[in-house]
Image (cartoon, rainbow, N blue to C red):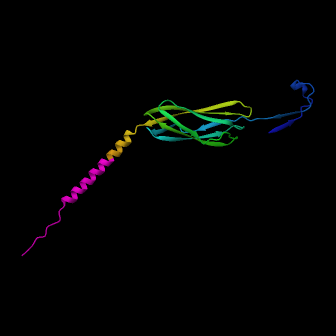
Amino acid sequence: REYHMDITNMEQYIRIDHVYGGKFQVIGLPELLLQLPDSMEITEGSVADLSVQLSNVGTGDATGITLSVEAPQGIDIQNISGYASTIPPGGQSDAFVSMTGLNEGEYPLSLVVSYEDAGGKVHTASHAFSVLVTSRMPLLLIVGIVIILAAGVATLVLLKTRSKKPPQESSSK
């Protein structure tokens, strides 16, 4: 936006001699908020996608947006994609973070977004969340138990049907 203002006869207030007019531009400041779950769960060795919503709740454009994840060993960040490099005031963009859980455990992660305002000043925002990496073993154990139970039931049904013999005919003379 551009505003025009006549500051004639205001020299005494702004302490500048001989000013007869002025022109200035009001620049709003962006403010990005990150919306994502506080925690998520991944099975060890599998890839999971985290959805992140970036919202500009400020009054200026957020430009030069970059997104990064600070992750400890045990979590491998595969890819960060999908987000816009500029978000206008009131706008939003979705980002996706693909990660692999390498080792069982709970890991604290931090998602960091940096962006610039119209004046070139860099701003940052971050959001901490945790990732629980669970073992594949319980899943394999459950599948194994289900298979054993199914085989046991099938065996019982088969034995019962074989044990039932058809009634023999009696002959009367």
Q: Is residue 54 magenta?
A: no
Position of residue 43 measured from the top left corner of the image (x, y, whole percent) = 44, 39
Q: In which quadrant of the rendered image does the N terminus lie?
A: top right
Q: In which quarter of the image is residue 88?
A: top right
What's the magenta bit mostly, secondary-structure-wise?
helix
Q: Is residue 48 left or right of residue 136?
A: right
Extreme residue toward the top, this view:
15
Position of residue 83 measured from the top left corner of the image (x, y, whole percent) = 62, 41
Q: In this view, does 120 lie to the left or right of 54?
A: right
Residue 116 against residue 140 in the figure, above or below: above
Q: Residue at x 32, y 45 (%)?
A: 145
Q: Is residue 159 magenta?
A: yes
Q: In which quadrant of the rendered image does the C terminus lie?
A: bottom left
Q: In which quarter of the image is residue 37?
A: top right
Q: Which residue is drawn at 18% across and 58% down?
A: 163
Extreme residue toward the bottom, this view:
173
Q: Residue at x 21, y 57 (%)?
A: 160
Numbered range of the magenta stretch: 146-173
Position of residue 12 measured from the top left corner of the image (x, y, whole percent) = 90, 24
